[in-house]
Amino acid sequence: MNSEVLAIKLLDLAEGRETPESWRSWWDEHEPELENLLSRGEFLKLKPCRHDFRWVPVLTSQKGAIAILEKSSTAFEASNLYQEQYLAELDAFCKEQERVQRKKQKEFKANNPELFCRYPKFSKALAKALEPSDEIQPAATEEQIASQESVLDFTLPAQVREFFLLTAGIQVSTGVILSLSGMFDLTIHGERYCVLGEFWKEADGDQLLLRPGEETIWYYAHEQDKVKRLCSDMTELLEKKLARYLNEQ
């Protein structure tokens, strides 16, 4: 490897004659030599990144090649090929994500008619916000709920029980988690609570809390180390607080 060979390769890259595969292959073969030949900054800018998109690595390397060529006052005509291919790849990816999301939303509506009937505002907002990785569990049974109450030594409020009889849990990546199996005891400032799930109202990981003998939903803002009253019951939580939150995402 010498400066003349490198200059030819940089021109090929800047002017769009490389493919993602040919550039990666050449780089992998000559990386140790390039590290010695180039300054540290030039080497890092030229090095193809690891990326799930095919065209991103060659696009970022092209920018590094252009910088080196300009520094050496080498004439070239920069190609827009890699940028165009990247944008096309990104557009295809976004369309596929939208297709998957629409499919999941449609399946959610079809599979959860009772949830839509009982909590229409929440269910509509949830269907809109669903991402491919989000999870809606099937309904829990009376036996499963009773078993969890026994483990927790905690009687669930009637409206919370009603919700779990429609779904045993919901996990939304934007910050809503309600899970029968994930409930646990938590003592905060000497008072016992049962954690219903998470609601990232103020910060990631903030928790929804229940107190024995109450329908009231409480909220633990962990960054402030404060327990706050959130709403009067599960219906208000779903139909007002969470529906509004999901619609804003």
Image (cartoon, helix red, strand yellow):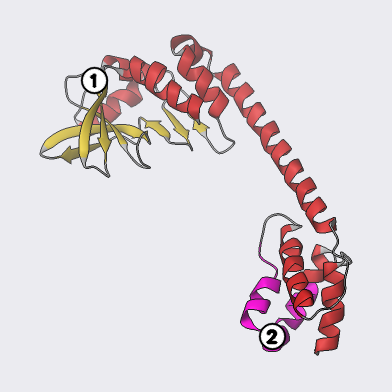
Residue 75 visible from this viewpoint: yes
Mark 2 sits on what residue?
32
Q: Residue at x 71, y 54 (%)?
A: 53
Q: Above or below — where is 39 with respect to 150?
A: below
Residue type at mark 1?
Answer: Thr
Residue 149, percent from left and from top = 25, 27
For the view shown, which residue lies furthest in the front direction?
A: 73
For the view shown, which residue lies furthest in the left direction?
A: 190
Q: Residue at x 24, y 18 (%)?
A: 215
From the viewer's perspective, is 121 left or right of 77? Answer: left
Residue 227, percent from left and from top = 21, 34
Residue type at mark 2?
Answer: Pro
Residue 217, percent from left and from top = 26, 24
Q: Quadrant of residue 183?
A: top left
Mark 1 sits on what residue?
216
Task: Tell which of 7 and 34 is nearer to you.
Answer: 7
From the viewer's perspective, is 82 left or right of 64? Answer: right
Secondary structure of the residue carrying tag 2 is helix
Secondary structure of the residue carrying tag 1 is loop
Q: Quadrant of residue 203?
A: top left
Residue 165 visible from this viewpoint: no
Q: Residue at x 75, y 42 (%)?
A: 91
Magenta stretch mostly in which secondary structure? helix
The answer to if 33 sits in the magenta stretch is yes
In the rendered view of the protein, which quadrant contains the N terminus? bottom right
> Which of the marked residues, 1 or 2, is nearer the chain's N terminus?
2
From the viewer's perspective, is 30 left or right of 8? Answer: left
Residue 46, percent from left and from top = 71, 73
Magenta stretch, residue numbers? 25-50
Dot 1, crowdedness within 10 Å: few (<14), some or many (≥20)?
A: some
